[in-house]
Amino acid sequence: MDILIIQMIIFIISFILLFLTVSLTSYNSLIYKKNQVNNAFSSIDVILQKRSDLIPRLVTLAQMYMQFEQKTLTEISRLRSTVTSKNLSENSRVTLEDQISRMLIRIIVAVEAYPELKTNDHFIQLQYSLNEVEEQLSAARRFYNSAVTEYNNAVEMFPANIIASWMKYQLKLQFKANPQARNNVNLQRNHN
């Protein structure tokens, strides 16, 4: 009988140690994955700030040439001010940044109607810088989506899902192309 009690105590202690090991490993893994998502979003934030710094220079230079595109230039300035001046949720910020991206595409397409602007060295440099920032942004969004996928998998999979619900971790949203971005860009300019 004494051996049976000792075996039972060893079994209970082993089970508790196994439970603690799995719990701590899951906890630490969730923390790591959450921090990866935050790091990836911060990288996107840094690149968006670079883009935001380029926009006023691009708009100012374009305004000198593009009298008929005033509405687009005004709207992009307004959106940029909104993004930089307010504390927005991640989802609101992503929506506004997508609108800015669409406006920037409109400006680049509109440049085709202004040959003197297309040949301006300063504008060419700004356009090159903007393209480079957009490529960096695309890469950062891919990294963010990868980190979010790992995090979401951990939040949903057993046994980490138990720890995640206890920590009140929620699924994160990935960056997705808006429906307009999925379509081919129409480079035809309307001359109204």
Image (cartoon, grey):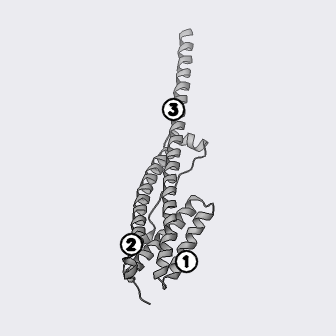
Foreground: disc 2 or disc 3: 2
Which one is in front, 146 or 1? Answer: 146
Residue 30 located left or right of residue 125: right
Residue visible at 52% across and 57% down in the picture: 45
Which one is in front, 49 or 37? Answer: 49
Tell me: residue 192, above or below residue 107: below
Residue visible at 54% across and 76% down in the picture: 75
Q: To which residue does mark 3 refer?
A: 22
User: Badge 1: how crowded within 10 Å, few (<14), some, or many (20+)?
Assistant: few
Which one is in front, 173 or 110? Answer: 110
Foreground: disc 3 or disc 1: 1
Residue kind at label 3, given as amino acid type: Val
In 3D space, how far apart are the residues under numbered discs 2 and 3 (Cα atoms)? 60 Å
Q: To which residue does mark 1 refer?
A: 74
Residue 42 in picture, x, y percent from top left: 52, 52
Residue kind at label 1, given as amino acid type: Thr
Tell me: residue 88, above or below residue 56: above
Residue kind at label 2, given as amino acid type: Asp
Residue 188 located left or right of residue 10: left
Residue 132 in picture, x, y percent from top left: 40, 62
